[in-house]
Amino acid sequence: MLWRRFDAMMKRGCTLFYLDSFGDSLEDVKLMRWLRERLGPDVRTYCEHQCDAIMPFSGGYSETTLEAERKDQPAHYRVWSGLDNWEIYRWLCPGSELAARLYEKKGQAPAGFETPDEFYTRHGIIPLVPVNDFSRAPGIKALQAAKPK
């Protein structure tokens, strides 16, 4: 049944799938390995919950919060699935992908503070842009062009 759903959507031209509430259990890893064999390398998937074992088979999805309201710590971005985890996944599985969107702003970023897209680029995270924020697109394009290959 699951495969029929993927197959039907791919026949309609879909080549990217978000896997909600998926990715952090052994059963999910086994299922994703099975799916990856059938999906092939050109269909991208992004699972909401990641673990090191799933990254060879699927990218991850996360949300980000700008933490700038507390005066006892410097402003920073918090990747919900864990920036340290992402760095470990990249080390264990070169070529891994993490896509993220800025979900919440707690406080106002100080003057000169990096944009979320600069943060994402610095950490090798794919920036997701909501439809109501396309004004960010030119800046993202410039960041990607300037990024060393």
Image: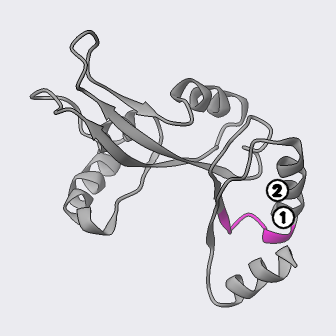
Q: Secondary structure at mark 2?
A: helix
- Residue at 83% over, 83% down: 4
Residue 114, percent from left and from top: 23, 33
Instruction: Look at the image and give the residue range highlighted in magenta.
Output: 38-44
Check if mark 1's residue and mark 2's residue have beta carbons within 8 Å: yes
Residue 28, percent from left and from top: 83, 51
Label 2 sits on residue: 32
Q: Secondary structure at mark 1?
A: helix
Whole-angstrom CA distance, mark 1 to mark 2, is 5 Å
User: Between residues 142 and 45, which one lies in front from this camera angle?
Assistant: 45
- Residue at 62% over, 86% down: 13
Task: Return the mark for residue 149.
Answer: none
Is 11 one of the magenta-colored residues? no
Above-or-below relation of 117 to 43: above
- Residue at 25% over, 67% down: 132
Above-or-below relation of 60 to 11: above
Quarter of the image with the C terminus in it: top left
The 10 Å Cα crowd at callout 1, few under 14, some 14 to 19, many 20 or more, is some
Label 1 sits on residue: 35
Dot 1 amino acid type: Leu
From this viewpoint, is residue 149 visible? no
Dot 2 amino acid type: Met
- Residue at 58% over, 27% down: 87
